Image: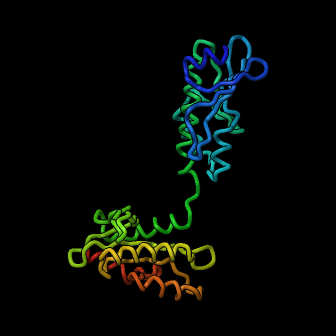
């Protein structure tokens, strides 16, 4: 086996290594642009070891993915001809005649892991808070809760809001959650939400259509400043007071 004959069948970039081994780079990439690759190593008796030497799972781990046994078991169940070693290497052994197919199987396993990598990362505090707000709203308005709604701002560019609810009286209400920081108000989230609402206001949205839900902490002295800033362009609701304001959305639904 040499690189030329392998390339004719698979179309990979290939380079020889010591003792007749080959290094392959596929045209497929992780989200960061790094190419998925494999190693082909002759193991005697006409057999080949096809492995990634744990590169795929190491990439996922290095980018923050949590490699739980349950997640790896799901990958194993999808690709039963490919083993995942305790060290995280994808491994398959095959003869010369089935080498191309086995390379494809191991690569498909690597591709599946690369696709799962993002979902295996812990969600950010902002994502968790948005999910919490969504659960609370969906509990009172059901299917009328719209997600990831896009609207044109005053400049013509598109603004995306995590949630919207159509109110017969007030019109479409655009809802932007603002997550708290680790120990205090996250001013980055505050400014981002304020900018969105200013753009929406300038585009003609009425006061009742611009809603910000703030994750709050009573011990943070900066919370009042954040609420004041957001109040210039939106109706601000504190998440801790949701028992008081959730019924308004129920009436709208």
**Drawn side of residue 230 relative to residue 46, left or right:** left
**Can residue 165 be seen by looking at this rendering?**
yes
Q: Residue at x 40, y 77 (%)?
A: 198
| View extreme (left): residue | 168
Residue 250 image point, x, y percent: 29, 75
Q: Name the quarter where the N terminus is drawn.
A: top right
With respect to residue 163, does 20 lie above or below?
above
Colour convention of the picture = rainbow
Residue at 55% over, 86% down? 218
Q: Is residue 253 visible?
A: no
Q: Quadrant of residue 22?
A: top right
**Percent from the top left, x then y, of residue 151?**
33, 65
From this view, report whether residue 127 is shown above or below residue 198.
above
The residue positioned farthest toward the right in the image shown = 18
Instruction: Give the image location of residue 119, x and y in percent.
Output: 53, 51
Task: Between residue 108 and residue 27, name the one nearer to us.
Answer: 27
Q: Is residue 111 left or right of residue 150?
A: right
Q: Quadrant of residue 133?
A: bottom left
* Numbered label tally: 0
Q: Position of residue 80 (x, y in %)?
A: 55, 29
Quarter containing the C terminus: bottom left
Residue at image position (57%, 75%) is 186
Q: Nearer the viewer, residue 236 or 10?
A: 10
The quarter of the picture where residue 86 lies is top right
Residue, far front: 155
- Seen in the picture, residue 158 relative to 21 is either above or below; the reply is below
């Amino acid at each position: 086996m040499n690189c030329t004959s392998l390339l004719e069948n698979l179309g990979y970039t290939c380079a020889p290594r010591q003792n007749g081994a080959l290094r392959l780079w596929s045209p497929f990439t992780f989200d960061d642009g790094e190419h998925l690759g494999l190693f082909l190593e002759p193991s005697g008796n006409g057999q080949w070891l096809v492995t990634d030497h744990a590169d795929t799972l190491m990439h996922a781990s290095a980018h923050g993915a949590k490699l739980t046994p349950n997640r790896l078991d799901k990958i194993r169940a999808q690709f039963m001809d490919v083993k995942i070693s305790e060290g995280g290497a994808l491994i398959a052994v095959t003869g010369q005649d089935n080498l191309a197919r086995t390379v494809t199987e191991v690569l498909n396993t690597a591709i599946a892991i690369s696709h799962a990598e993002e979902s295996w990362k812990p969600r950010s505090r902002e994502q968790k808070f948005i999910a919490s707000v969504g659960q609370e709203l969906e509990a009172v308005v059901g299917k009328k809760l719209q997600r990831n709604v896009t609207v044109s701002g005053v400049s013509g560019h598109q603004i995306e809001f995590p949630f919207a609810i159509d109110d017969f009286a007030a019109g479409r209400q655009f809802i932007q959650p603002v997550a708290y920081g680790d120990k205090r108000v996250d001013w980055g989230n505050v400014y981002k939400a304020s900018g969105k609402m200013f753009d929406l206001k300038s585009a003609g949205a009425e006061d009742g259509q611009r809603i910000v839900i703030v994750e709050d902490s009573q011990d943070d002295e900066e919370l009042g400043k954040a609420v004041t800033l957001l109040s210039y362009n939106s109706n601000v609701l504190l998440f801790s007071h949701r028992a008081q304001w959730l019924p308004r959305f129920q009436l709208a639904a």
